[in-house]
Image (cartoon, rainbow, N blue to C red):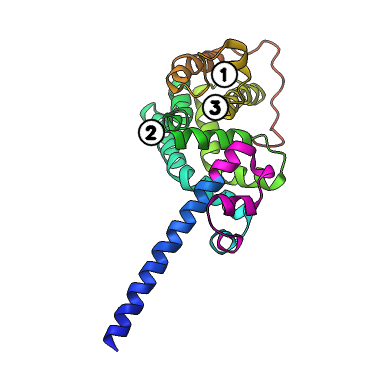
């Protein structure tokens, strides 16, 4: 009886390890395919085939294609967003509630740009950049959900760093910041085509050296003389 119990326990551990391995393969396959083709252009069957698995396993581990996207995002973003929130909170605290916008942008954008230093991170940034413009309402819901907390921290810190800007002007300037981030991460090759093969949006050091100062200068510009009255945005931005 003891021997049977031991064999059962060993079999259970092996099954559990095999299940974890299958789950990771499915996540890796989904991340690759979503990055290459976009969420809406990839089927669960394609993901299962790429993962050398089956649709039943994908549904067992994630419930649905939407659940799989949430898991793909959460696997990398949980840690990154926690770091971003920590950095934003720290720069607010260190500056007594009046941080420099350069520090705010670095805390928010820096961790995601540096993610592209690895092939897996570059692929993930490509995925999120493309997902940000995906018209699928389910994708929007998931993105708003996973980025909501850190996005609110960023807007609060940016408002504290730029107290002379009206809410409307802050909204439009942050729209430009988000737009630059999404374009860099989507890396669709358009500018490389225009400038030549020596340039790539995957150049993290170049983005930190050139794009970050540009965005900082734009946020530091004096308020527009023709600034519109304050208006609460009807929909919030996602990252």
Residue 159: numbered disc: 3
Left or right position of 209 against 132: left
In depth, the one of 134 and 179 nearer the eye is: 134
Please tell me which of labels 1 and 2 falls first in the chain: 2
| Badge 3 density bin: few <14, some 14–19, many ≥20, Cα 10 Å | some
Mark 2 element type: helix
Q: Quadrant of the C terminus?
A: top right
Residue 100 in percent (x, y) is at: 44, 21
Residue range of the region highlighted in magenta in the rendering = 31-57
In depth, the one of 80 and 29 nearer the eye is: 29
Q: Which residue is mark 2?
A: 90
The tally of labels here is: 3
Q: Which residue is mark 1?
A: 164
| The quarter of the displayed image where residue 166 is located | top right
Kindly identify the residue that appears in the image at 55 percent across and 37 percent down.
152
Q: Is residue 45 visible?
A: yes
């Amino acid at each position: 009886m003891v021997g049977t119990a031991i064999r059962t326990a060993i079999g259970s551990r092996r099954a559990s390890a095999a299940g974890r391995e299958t789950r990771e393969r499915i996540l890796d396959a989904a991340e690759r395919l979503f990055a290459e083709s976009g969420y809406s252009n990839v089927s669960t069957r394609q993901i299962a085939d790429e993962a050398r698995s089956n649709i039943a396993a994908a549904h067992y581990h994630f419930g649905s294609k939407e659940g799989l996207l949430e898991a793909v995002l959460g696997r990398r973003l949980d840690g990154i967003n926690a770091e971003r929130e920590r950095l934003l909170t720290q720069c607010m605290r260190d500056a007594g509630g009046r941080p420099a916008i350069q520090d705010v942008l670095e805390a928010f954008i820096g961790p995601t740009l540096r993610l592209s230093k690895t092939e897996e991170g570059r692929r993930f940034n490509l995925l999120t950049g493309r997902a940000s413009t995906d018209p699928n309402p389910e994708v929007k819901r998931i993105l708003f959900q996973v980025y909501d907390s850190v996005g609110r921290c960023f807007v609060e810190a940016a408002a504290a760093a730029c107290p002379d800007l009206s809410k409307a002007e802050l909204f439009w300037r942050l729209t430009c910041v988000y737009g630059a981030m999404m374009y860099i991460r989507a890396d669709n090759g358009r500018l490389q085509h225009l400038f030549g093969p020596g340039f790539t949006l995957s150049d993290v050091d170049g983005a930190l050296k050139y794009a970050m100062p540009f965005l900082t200068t734009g946020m530091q510009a004096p308020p527009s003389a023709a600034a519109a009255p304050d208006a609460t945005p009807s929909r919030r931005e996602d990252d």
